[in-house]
Image: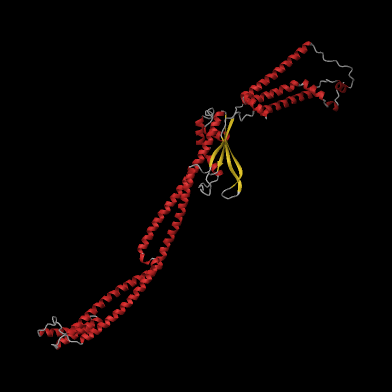
């Protein structure tokens, strides 16, 4: 008879599902155990990697900013990135690798560059911790890095801890070295600038001194003195010229009086000679020797002297014997001496006047050059004072950095010895293996059940054949069947116990010490 299938015969009850589980228990358990065992092998075969982390806080400077201003202009984020690049350099990482004998198993299979790159990219972790803060420079809120963490991953817990602490100390040392060097460079730069400006001031002072020495009498501060001197010289010259005119008038009067007085009473020719001599003196005072009257008078004097000589009377040795004549002649000689003295004084005053006038006329040009030098000197002085103040501030800031009172890094959570591996995550792998194993077992059981055409139910049989079922024969169980069933139960129980024991041993040796597990369990139960 042809087999018939009805749609409602596919609906399963709880009893049907229970029957399927009993029939397909090994189909479910074997794949599940196989996949779970494979995941366990994978979990325990992967090398264990431990991770140790150091957390470092970025502390503000200890001295208030209104008292000491740090001469470090970069922000903590920028400086931290710069320090991180130095620490992550090949030279620094090679020193750490050599010191702690890291990656000994890879040195035969990888180059030094590849080992350093593996450490830098995979085994070292650098993370920053930010928070909302108020920028002390601008007073505006914003995000700022307040701390950062440095982690290292490796297979040896003690080595991992030591390397993490070493990296943290490198960050601390590099930060101190960077800040101290930057502060020292700033201080040295300010000191060099101050010395340079001071040297320029000394050169400019020499220029000013030379300029003052060259134009000392025409400097702006002496302008009033020069004007007063010029005025005084002009007044003195006016007085001297008046005195000179008076003396010349007196000289002229004396000459006229002297001409009218005879030096002696003996000889008319001698009187004529005397008159000619007086006239010659008068002419010489007004004209030069080439003047015709002067030449004529000289000739007349020579002629008279010659006649007197011929008669035995020496004109040159003749002395006047008239007292009035002698007195006037003495007064005339004194007057002429005074005239010469006054003329010399007038000449000196004229030179002095020209000197004062030259000073006054050159004063604007000298003042312009002098003021230019003074402006440069004042500018350099202001710059020097500013640099001197900044240099002192830089030295104070350098002292603050040297005493480690500025912004610094401090360890708030030192690297600890890891108690359990960071990877692989054995519980997660085992759980995934268990889920995949159960899924594969259930899938295999579902496939076998869907391809099995056996009829195990009277209702199903009647539905499929169309004939009523008269009776059912129960399963005949012998003593051997009971013994075999009992043995299978014992074996199953032993297998479960073995799996539990193996799991406990695996946890003890590969995950966590049982004492630690027990202590944590008791702590949680007490809580």
In the rendering, at what x and y percent does residue 197 appear? Answer: 43, 54
Q: Position of residue 70 (x, y in %)?
A: 51, 47
Residue occupying the far bottom of the picture: 268
Relative to 14, does residue 76 appear above or below in the rendering? below
Q: Nearer the viewer, residue 229 or 313?
A: 229
Front residue (pair 130, 405): 405
Camera sees residue 295? no
How many numbered marks, from 0 up? 0
Residue 11 falls in which quadrant of the image? top right
> Which residue extends farthest front?
526
Q: Position of residue 451 (x, y in %)?
A: 78, 23
Quarter the C terminus occupies: top right
Colouring chosen for the image of the structure: secondary structure
Give me the residue at 88% from left, 16% from top.
471
Residue furthest out toward the top: 479
Image quadrant assignment for residue 311: bottom left
Residue closer to the observer: 149 or 461: 149
Residue 219 lies, in percent from the top left, at 38, 65
Question: Would you identify the image quadrant in which residue 519 lies?
Answer: top right
Q: Is residue 283 left or right of residue 513?
A: left
Image quadrant occupied by the N terminus: top right
Q: Is residue 310 left or right of residue 293?
A: left
Task: Give the vertical position of 394 relative to 346 (above or below).
Answer: above
Reply above or below: 422 against 289. Answer: above
- Identified at 25% across, 76% down, the residue is 340
Is residue 422 depicted above or below 179 in this figure?
A: above
Residue at the (47%, 47%) spot, across then down: 396
Query: Could you tell me if residue 329 is visible in this image?
Result: yes
The reply, left or right, for residue 32 in relation to residue 215 is right
């Amino acid at each position: 008879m042809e087999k018939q299938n009805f749609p409602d015969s596919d609906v399963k009850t709880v009893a049907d599902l229970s029957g399927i589980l009993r029939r397909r228990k090994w189909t479910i358990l074997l794949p599940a155990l196989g996949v779970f065992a494979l995941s366990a092998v994978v979990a325990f075969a992967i090398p264990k990697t431990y991770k140790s982390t150091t957390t470092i806080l970025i502390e503000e400077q200890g001295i208030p900013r209104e008292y000491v201003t740090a001469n470090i202009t970069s922000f903590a984020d920028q400086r931290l990135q710069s320090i991180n690049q130095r620490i992550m350099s090949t030279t620094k990482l090679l020193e750490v690798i050599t010191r702690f004998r890291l990656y000994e198993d890879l040195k035969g299979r990888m180059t030094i560059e590849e080992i350093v790159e593996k450490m830098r990219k995979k085994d070292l972790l650098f993370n920053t911790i930010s928070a909302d803060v108020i920028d002390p420079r601008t007073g505006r809120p914003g995000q700022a890095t307040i701390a950062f963490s440095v982690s290292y991953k490796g297979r040896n817990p003690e080595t991992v801890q030591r390397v993490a602490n070493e990296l943290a100390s490198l960050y601390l040392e590099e930060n101190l070295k960077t800040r101290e060097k930057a502060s020292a460079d700033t201080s040295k730069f300010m000191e060099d600038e101050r010395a340079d400006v001071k040297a320029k001031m000394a050169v400019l002072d020499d220029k000013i001194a030379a300029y003052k020495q060259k134009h000392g009498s025409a400097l702006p501060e002496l302008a009033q003195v020069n004007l007063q001197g010029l005025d005084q010289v002009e007044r003195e010259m006016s007085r001297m010229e008046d005195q000179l005119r008076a003396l010349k008038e007196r000289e002229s009067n004396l000459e006229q009086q002297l001409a009218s007085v005879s030096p002696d009473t003996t000889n008319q020719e001698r009187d004529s000679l005397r008159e000619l001599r007086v006239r010659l003196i008068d002419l010489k005072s007004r004209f030069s020797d080439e003047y015709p009257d002067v030449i004529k008078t000289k000739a007349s004097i020579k002629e008279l002297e010659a006649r007197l000589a011929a008669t035995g009377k020496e004109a040159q040795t003749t002395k006047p014997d008239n007292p009035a004549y002698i007195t006037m002649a003495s007064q005339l000689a004194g007057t002429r001496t005074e005239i010469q003295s006054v003329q010399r004084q007038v000449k000196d005053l004229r030179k002095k006047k020209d000197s004062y006038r030259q000073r006054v006329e050159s004063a604007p040009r000298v003042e312009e050059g002098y003021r230019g030098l003074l402006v440069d000197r004042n500018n350099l002085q202001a710059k020097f004072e500013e640099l001197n103040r900044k240099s002192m501030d830089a030295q104070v800031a350098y002292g603050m950095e040297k005493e480690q009172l500025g912004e610094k890094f401090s360890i708030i959570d030192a690297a600890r010895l890891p108690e359990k591996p960071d990877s692989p995550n054995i519980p997660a792998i085992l759980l995934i293996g268990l889920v995949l194993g159960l899924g594969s077992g259930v899938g295999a059981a579902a496939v076998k059940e869907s391809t099995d055409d056996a009829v195990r139910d009277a209702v199903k049989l009647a539905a499929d054949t169309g004939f009523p079922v008269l009776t059912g024969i129960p399963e005949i169980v012998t003593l051997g069947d009971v013994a075999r069933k009992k043995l299978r139960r014992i074996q199953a129980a032993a297998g479960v116990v073995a799996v539990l024991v193996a799991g406990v041993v695996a946890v003890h040796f590969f995950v966590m010490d049982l004492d630690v597990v027990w202590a944590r369990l008791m702590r949680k139960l007490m809580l």
